[in-house]
Amino acid sequence: MAETGAEVSAANRSFTQQEQREAAEFVLRLGNALLQAGYPINQIGELLLALSHSLDLPQPQVYVTPTVIEVTIGPLTHQHRALLVTTPGDVNLGHLTQLDAIARSVAAGKLTPRDGIARLEALSAAPPLHSALLVGVAYALTAAAFARTLGGGLREILVAALVGGVTGALSVLAHLFTRLQRIFPPLAAFVASFMVTAWAARVTPVSGDLVTLAGLFALLPGFTLTVALEELASRDLVSGTVRLTSAFITLFGLILGVALGRQFGARLFGDVSPATPETLPAWTYVVAALVAGVAYTLWLQVERRDIVWVVLACLIGALAARAGVMVLGQQLGAFAAALAVGLASNFFALATGRPAAVMQVPGLIVLVPGSIGLQSFQALFTAQTVVGIQAAFQMFLTAIALVYGIFVANLLLPSRHPLRTLFDVVSRIEQTVLPRGGKGEKRRRG
């Protein structure tokens, strides 16, 4: 029996609506996956909007916050909205690179939105690239490397590695038990501070503050603070404010844990006199940067093909920071180091066609001022008001110097995502070649 024209039209319209629903669902699920992988929220919104246009979604609007992702399509009076409540996750560079590949394939038509959703589900269900044991080792390596960066000697490096390993073990337990995760930062800080006090009193003297800072380096919210200021500078006020508040809550939890652990240790073992670290050769600083790069490949779940790039980013960040501080001072040195990391990351993205975050994230983690923040609030906690305020000011100034260093790098050597670049090109063509009231409207009027 032949179908009427109305029936064929209805079938085509239904199929089109189904495709739009699948495309909108893919955009929503991709945004959630990017948020779970630690992608900056302001960049998620730009990427999802560009992807929506490439999938021909009608009049798309995207709204992203740390807890809600919303995709709206259609004209203002007949909108269809899809909303997903979520929570942000830790940075996972392995997932970010795979999500980037999936998004490109769907935008290029190599995968349908339905296939893209299946790929996202498979990626979400896949086991982590590196086991919990290796992540614990990464905490220990990170602590050892940062102890050398802070000027520690061999004793400080060894004790920091031990404290970092215990912190990594607690991190694994916190991921297994949700209730423990809520108190993980102050608990880890308490254990670290108590261990350092006990070691200095019963085994061998060490620089307690230095070792405690190094052992807790993986928990310091310096990177979170820097990203928050980047979002605020990009006028993403909601996301920036939420992330900034989260950074302060974590910082206060760490300060509380350190203070309690130190007081408890002092009551059991008595007061401990601080020790002066031995001076190590300058070449050990380079070794520390390389060790930090190896640790970040485990900690950030980096794919095997990106290990060299992550280590190189850490080396660039560490050497640029050291040279910048020696020549320009702390704030200008941080700006110059962030500029170097940003340029290297963008060049990597242009040369390989892969996300700049592969190099930018580990390079910035080397530079972030989390240790300054912990020292500043510790000083305020012990009634050293002037010292604490000065250190807090230094922390914010260093963080904003890093942010604008990245901004300038993006200006000098843009590394825009292909989806966003495509969207910009199409928009400019529409504005210049087919302006409103131009030939298209004249033909319709005629």
Image: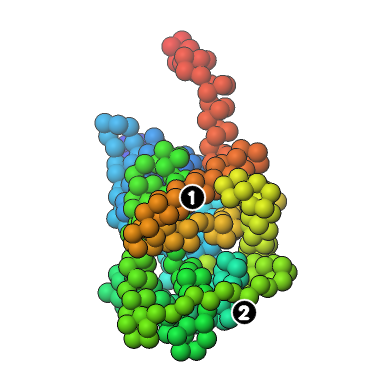
Residue name at image x 68 percent, y 58 percent: 319
Q: Quadrant of residue 171?
A: bottom left
Q: Among all residues in the image, which is located at the extreme bottom?
A: 202
Crowding near pointer 2: few (<14 within 10 Å), some, many (20+)?
some
22 relative to 7, above or below: below
The answer to whether residue 57 is left or right of residue 317 is: left
> Relative to 168, is 66 on the left or the right?
left
Nearest to the observer: residue 358 or residue 9: 358
Q: Which residue bears the numbered disc 1? A: 394
Q: Position of residue 288 (x, y in %)?
A: 64, 70
Residue 27 percent location from the top left of the image: 42, 50
* Labelled disc at residue 154: 2
Q: Please tell me which residue lies in front, 381 or 318.
A: 381
Type of the residue with mark 1 = Gln
Residue placed most toward the observer, 280 or 44:
280
Q: Percent from the top left, x then y, of residue 264?
A: 32, 80
The kind of secondary structure element at disc 2 is helix
Query: Residue 103 vs residue 235: left or right?
Result: right
The reply to whether the C-beta atoms of the residues labelled 2 and 1 are less than 8 Å apart is no
Q: Residue at x 67, y 53 (%)?
A: 326
